[in-house]
Amino acid sequence: MTEFPKDFLWGGATAANQLEGAYDVDGRGLSIDDVIPGGKDRMKIVQSPDFDWTPNAKYTYPNHEGIDFYHHYQEDIGLFAEMGFKTYRFSIAWSRIFPQGDETQPNEKGLAFYDAVIDECLKYDIEPVITLSHYELPLHLAEAYGGWKNKDLIGFFKHYAETVIDRFGDKVKYWLTFNEINSAAGFPFMSQGMISKTGADDKKNVFQAWHNQFVASAYAVQAAHAKNPACQVGNMIIFATNYAFDSDPKNQLAALKFNQGFNFYCADVQVRGEYPAYSESLYEMYGFTGADLDRTPEELALLKQYHVDFLSFSYYMSGVTDVTGKVDEKTQGNMLGGVKNPFLKESEWGWQIDPTGLRIGLNQLHDRYQVPLFIVENGLGAKDTVEADGKIYDDYRIDYLRSHVEAIRGAIADGVPVMGYTPWGCIDLVSASTGEMSKRYGFIYVDLDDEGHGTLARSKKKSFAWYKQVIATNGEDL
Ligand code: BGP
């Protein structure tokens, strides 16, 4: 049986906005996520032309409280250590460090909090992996500057990245720049701080914002390498393996184009350091040309010099392309809907479960980039039931994760270099797409419901012991 590398980074992943809570504590400023209402329509609300980001009494904002990791981090990291985590991926809330985003002086209390979180990880030999920006742009940068389409944000992010890398770069080796950077294709507010009124509907702005983020990301690579040669920086994309529905060349070409536009465009720039040849045909689809984008020769040189060291991605599902209209049945997805794949089962939220797609995706990414790959999100969102004995028997989650770990093993056997695996929401947290607690991913249950009621007590699900065994045997005992 193929073995996982000895230093394989087993762990789990979270994001500040979905678990920390304490949204107005110790000088933290508001982030864009603090003004998106909770509830299953939150993504629709944020995309509507009337979206208004001033707090509104008719909505709830579950991320304001999260699971209160801010005051429970010692207990939570202790539980991760008990599972044997080698790594923990979390994000820094930019607005804890620079409450408005454009200040020169950082907020010391924000830095002190992450110092404590990092030290707690290191106490157990857990390697921190830090995402610099996970759907939590300081709100002021969206309000006053119009989000990432504005080039001023490059300088603000550079200063933020340099500040945290300078502070933590001796203790933290792995850094990720923008979470799921390509998700702006569907959700420009979460990803780039832009709404209809500030130009999100004009694709040219989305591509300009991406360029600005690529440059900002290159500055983070530069800062990390200068601080500590051991530091490695990855980009982070949402990856959903995409199949043509059938052998009809029209569907094959459309799937290829979909992959270029969604799965590869951002990674091509961030990993290879240059814009791919198909860029112009992509821009043409949206009615503009590369000359319409503000990209200076100095910036293009920076992208080339400071490309990332590894590629990280989230993988929840695969998708199907059918431009020929042969399939009627539709499906939901993580950012992406599409047509139903008759060979796959779905989660309760209609996300198509496809472990083999992960093996295929890992091979595709390796063929294309030849850099180490890190799966930094994967998992099954499910409703858990606490049984009469107080326990949660989440065999469905174990089945999902087991099949994906097997797929990773398959890819390693295919010769793909995989650095690690950090399942999403290793402790239950607020869902990004629904803003609800009831869509749970964790090995650790948190007593909190969709209405915000609960003791916040943490308890171990059946999957906790399963994952502990997986890590202890380096993936042998599944
Ligand atoms: C990814 C995001 C995460 C996370 C996950 C699960 O796209 O990076 O923030 O939430 O999806 O999605 P959801 O919470 O909507 O089920």
Image: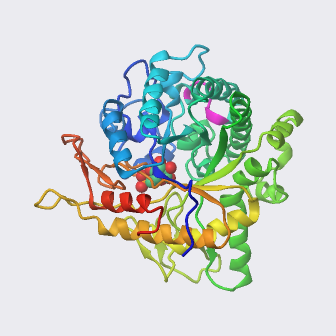
The foreground one among 96 and 426 is: 426
Is residue 288 or residue 213 the one in the foreground?
213
Residue drawn at x 68%, y 27% is 158
Q: Is residue 8 left or right of residue 208?
A: left
Quadrant in which the C terminus appears: bottom left
The magenta region covers 143-148
Q: Can residue 436 be seen in the rendering of this structure? A: yes
The residue at the point 87 percent across, 33 percent down is 298
| Residue nearest the viewer, comparing 297 with 399 | 399
Q: Residue 7 placed where, x, y %?
A: 56, 53
Pick the front one: 128 or 13: 128
The answer to whether 438 appears left or right of 309 in the picture is: left
Residue 152, position as x, y percentages in the image: 70, 26
Q: Is residue 11 above or below residue 33?
A: below
Residue farthest top in this picture: 105
Residue 36 visible in the snapshot: no
Q: Is residue 153 above or below residue 212?
A: above
> Going 57% across and 45% down the picture, which residue do you hit?
179
